[in-house]
């Protein structure tokens, strides 16, 4: 059969398009051709599982509330934001539509919004999910008109006689053309005029307030007319730079932090000519041989969400206390629905500083083994040393158990391994080629159980990469 | 034991074996070097501190008119001039002021101010323009261009702020040097560090992880060992902020080769019932800084220390309907130190007759001028390569 992928390449595909792969799934896929595997990936994501929450508490008219009630409402909203975070992270861990969710995560960062309005945030998240493998232009239009975006980038305050340029600027700088590409300050001003009058009603439905709209003639990117906001977005989509900017960003996310200009040029053409079809672009990326080249495999630093979801998925970890998942996201600097600003998470190397790295290295042992990494160098130790160590492990275990309350299902991992060969397990767990130091560690591991050996692998810096 | 001998012993006799040989060779400052070694401590009052109720334009009618419920009365202040007064919770700061150790810089801000906490904090920490998104901080870029070791900029906190992130070097976040050290004592990681070889430290992401791990190890071990040299006997107030300042004092007096320290006091977002919350926080601030200065003076290190206090923005002049204030723009900055060149009230007071469209104070000093001054005049490095621009230098140091 032609075009078979190696195990490592299939793992690569599943890390980039999802959050890793289980051993049984790998066993099935390795007999399929590349095209078939890719088809299956898209088929699995046909459906979109929308998030839903109960917002009946918001129905009351705000004006009739007392001060105390308003305070209560604010508290409830904050709490719902955390619930929303939990809802999505659970879907990321347990959901079946991995590629769709991965793209939703990409656009959650691209259309970065930080609000204390759970209803608007949930709505935006579902809009993104709906279009995640569809048409970018349609996504952009619907996102721009969503209450979340209208609120976050102040388009609601953008009125004929007092324009607010916030959205007009960011739609070009961050969502379409990229900073300092093609547009001028005048284009921003003119676009802001076109976006005047955009608002939404009490039900969260987009509304166009004609009284606040500037119907005058605008000149935008060399075009002149009585443009509306919709027209501006259409003009932006006509610009090939928009296709290029998106392609570069998607390439960085799925392939490599460093872009290959030649590769980008072809992909941009594909994306533009498909009228911004995201599935077409993604298919082209993950079908190309370059995607599977060694220099791309294991080259990216996992985002905190990729790390947490990846490990939780592999071991089907059950978190008794939802606050733990929230805490992990917070200390690792990526909380879903709480991006740092409109530019999203900077990503890449900036995930790593001395404290986040040490936490990340400890994470696996904490959620899988109550914080214990059983490791010792010398083989013939006196019994007292062994006893002291056991005592230490016991203390650590009881402390972490109380705090973290994570229950991994080791059986689903251990029972599905095809062999107990160390190199096989290492290759299944780690994406990059282990460093010389890590290789030595793997060879020297004196651990008598597979479980302890796996914990060691997961505690290597190599596990931070995918 | 003499200090120098103790230093030698702790370096050479104790377990430096954790660190691969190519990373060894870290020096301590000897006492004579120590005497000329300048530090800067940067304190962020997070949440947007209301500068107008901190350093108060007490004789200004507009101030009293726009803040009928929250303006400070003369009796609640400590006089600076006929027109200006400290909030009376700033007793220790006032004492320092009287000694000629404080410089008050008014109307500090930047063009087109952003009123989001996150965004404005980023702008202050990266020293960017309003419309510019940078991924490195100004202290991070100082590390990049002027330092060899991450610990030359330390944040005494649990995580590292953007301010201390550079391209090739990041500062170190440490809230408790002992704890940081303990996290690096996991035997598994020790073995890994031992087995790390130079050729593993490539420019790629994997190399970067190993490099960061090694730096964490060497810094944790360096900070742990060095900071044990001095433990202060000065009494500090019992709160988390004071504890962080005490840690900084221990570091400075111990002779850590750190030039920039960073820490924060949060909770200044006073939209509701501001008087109570802000006064409480200003007490914490003043008492803690007071203890820090006493400590540094005792050890003859105050003359080489500069303490800069800022907030991501000031607050609206007009109070809101809940006895609070909303997000504003330009604000007052305090520079405290034993080596100031110009003390007292540095420049003109805020002009409450000429507010911006939002009713906020307009800036007259760009905050990056203050950074440029600290970098150029105090730390004596090239400020332009760090700030990517030539900002006017001021004369407070």
Image (cartoon, rainbow, N blue to C red):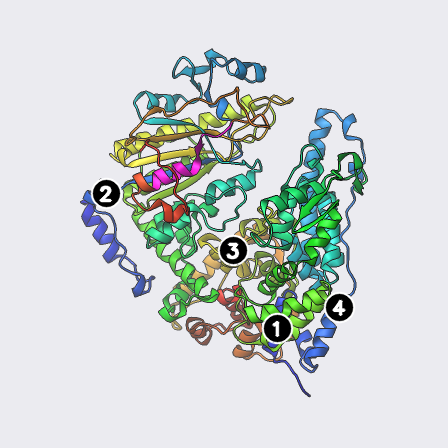
Residue assigned mark 3: A351
- The region drawn magenta spans B362-375
Other-residue count near label 4 (Cα within 10 Å), few / some / many at <14 / 14–19 / ≥20:
some
Q: Which chain carries label 3?
A: A
Q: Which of B133 and A443 is in front in this view?
A: B133
In the image: residue A339, left or right of residue A238: left
Residue assigned mark 4: A44
- The C terminus of chain A sits in image quarter: bottom right
| Marks 3 & 2 on one chain | no
| Marks 4 & 2 on one chain | no
| Marks 1 & 2 on one chain | no
* Image coords of residue B186 (percent x, y): 43, 59
Q: Is residue B343 above or below residue A104?
A: above
Residue assigned mark 2: B34
Other-residue count near label 3 (Cα within 10 Å), few / some / many at <14 / 14–19 / ≥20:
some
- Nearest to N terminus: mark 1 or mark 4: 1
Other-residue count near label 2 (Cα within 10 Å), few / some / many at <14 / 14–19 / ≥20:
some
Residue assigned mark 1: A11
Q: Which chain carries label 4?
A: A
Q: Which chain carries label 2?
A: B
* Image coords of residue A141 (percent x, y): 74, 51
| Marks 1 & 4 on one chain | yes
């Amino acid at each position: 059969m032609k075009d078979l992928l190696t195990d490592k390449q299939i793992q690569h595909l599943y890390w980039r398009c999802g959050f890793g792969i289980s051993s049984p799934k790998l066993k099935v896929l390795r007999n399929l051709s590349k095209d078939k595997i890719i088809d299956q990936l898209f088929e699995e994501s046909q459906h979109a599982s929308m998030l839903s929450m109960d917002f009946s508490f918001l129905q009351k008219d705000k004006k009739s509330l007392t001060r105390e009630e308003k305070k209560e409402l604010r508290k409830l909203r904050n709490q719902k934001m955390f619930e929303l975070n939990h809802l999505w992270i659970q879907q990321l861990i347990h959901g079946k539509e991995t590629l769709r969710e991965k793209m939703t995560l990409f656009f959650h960062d691209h259309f970065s919004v930080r609000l204390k309005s759970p209803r608007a945030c949930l709505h935006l998240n579902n809009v993104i999910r709906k279009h995640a493998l569809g048409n970018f232009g349609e996504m952009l239009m619907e996102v721009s008109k969503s209450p979340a975006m209208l609120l976050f980038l102040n388009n609601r305050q953008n009125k004929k006689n007092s324009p607010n340029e916030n959205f007009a600027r960011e739609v070009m700088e961050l969502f379409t053309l990229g900073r300092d590409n093609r547009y001028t300050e005048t284009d921003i001003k003119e676009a802001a005029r076109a976006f005047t009058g955009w608002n939404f009603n009490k039900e969260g439905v987009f509304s166009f307030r004609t009284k606040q709209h500037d119907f005058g003639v605008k000149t935008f990117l060399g075009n002149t007319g009585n443009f509306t906001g919709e027209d501006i977005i259409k003009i932006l989509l006509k610009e090939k730079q928009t296709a290029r900017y998106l392609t570069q960003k998607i390439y960085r996310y799925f392939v490599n932090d460093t872009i290959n200009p030649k590769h980008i040029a072809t992909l941009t053409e594909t994306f533009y000519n498909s009228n911004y079809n995201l599935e077409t672009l993604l298919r082209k990326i993950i079908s190309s041989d370059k995607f599977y080249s060694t220099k791309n495999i294991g080259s990216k630093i996992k985002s905190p969400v990729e790390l947490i979801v990846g490990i939780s998925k592999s071991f089907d970890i059950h978190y008794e206390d939802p606050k733990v998942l929230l805490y992990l996201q917070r200390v690792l600097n990526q909380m879903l629905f709480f991006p740092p600003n409109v530019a999203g998470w900077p990503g890449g190397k900036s995930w790593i500083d001395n404290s986040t790295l040490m936490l990340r290295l400890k994470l696996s042992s904490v959620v899988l083994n109550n914080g214990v990494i059983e490791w010792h160098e010398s083989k013939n130790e006196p019994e007292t040393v062994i006893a002291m160590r056991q005592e230490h492990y016991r203390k650590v275990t009881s402390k972490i158990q109380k705090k973290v309350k994570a229950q991994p299902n080791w059986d689903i991992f251990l029972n599905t391994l095809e062999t107990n060969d160390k190199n096989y397990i290492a290759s299944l767990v780690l994406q990059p080629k282990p460093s010389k130091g890590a290789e030595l560690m793997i060879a020297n591991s004196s651990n008598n159980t597979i479980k302890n050996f796996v914990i060691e692998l997961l505690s290597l810096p190599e596990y931070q990469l995918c | 034991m003499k200090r120098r001998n103790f230093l030698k012993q702790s370096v050479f006799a104790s377990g430096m074996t954790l660190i691969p040989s190519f990373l060894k060779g870290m020096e301590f400052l000897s006492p004579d070097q120590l005497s000329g070694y300048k530090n800067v401590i940067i304190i962020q009052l997070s949440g947007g501190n209301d500068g107008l109720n901190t350093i108060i334009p007490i004789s200004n009618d507009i101030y009293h008119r726009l803040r009928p419920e929250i303006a400070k009365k003369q009796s609640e202040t400590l006089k600076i001039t006929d027109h200006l007064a400290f909030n009376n919770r700033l007793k220790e700061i006032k004492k320092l002021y009287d000694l000629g150790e404080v410089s008050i810089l008014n109307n500090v801000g930047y063009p087109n101010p952003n009123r989001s906490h996150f965004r404005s904090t980023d702008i202050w920490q990266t020293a960017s323009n309003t419309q510019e998104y940078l991924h490195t901080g100004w202290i991070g870029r100082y590390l990049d261009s002027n330092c060899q070791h991450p610990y030359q900029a330390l944040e005494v906190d649990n995580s590292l702020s953007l301010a201390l992130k550079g391209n090739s070097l990041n500062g170190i976040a440490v809230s408790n040097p002992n704890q940081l050290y303990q996290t690096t004592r996991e035997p598994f990681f020790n073995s890994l560090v031992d087995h790390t070889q130079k050729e593993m430290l490539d420019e790629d992401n994997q190399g970067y992880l190993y490099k960061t791990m090694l730096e964490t190890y060497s810094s944790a071990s360096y900070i742990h060992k060095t900071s044990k040299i001095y433990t202060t006997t000065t009494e500090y107030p019992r709160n988390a902020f004071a504890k962080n300042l005490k840690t900084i004092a221990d570091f400075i007096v111990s002779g850590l080769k750190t030039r920039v320290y960073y820490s924060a006091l949060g909770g200044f977002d006073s939209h509701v019932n501001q008087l109570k919350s802000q006064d409480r926080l200003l007490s914490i601030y003043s008492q803690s800084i007071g203890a820090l200065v006493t400590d540094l003076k005792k050890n003859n290190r105050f003359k080489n220390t500069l303490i800069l206090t800022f907030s991501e923005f000031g607050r609206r002049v007009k109070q809101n309907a809940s006895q609070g204030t909303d997000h504003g723009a330009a604000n007052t900055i305090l520079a405290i130190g034993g080596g100031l060149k110009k003390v007292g009230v540095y420049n003109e007071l805020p002009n409450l007759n000429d507010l911006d469209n939002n009713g906020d104070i307009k800036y007259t000093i760009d905050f990056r001028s203050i950074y440029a001054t600290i970098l150029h005049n105090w730390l004596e490095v090239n400020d332009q390569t760090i700030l990517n621009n030539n900002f006017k230098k001021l004369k407070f140091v």
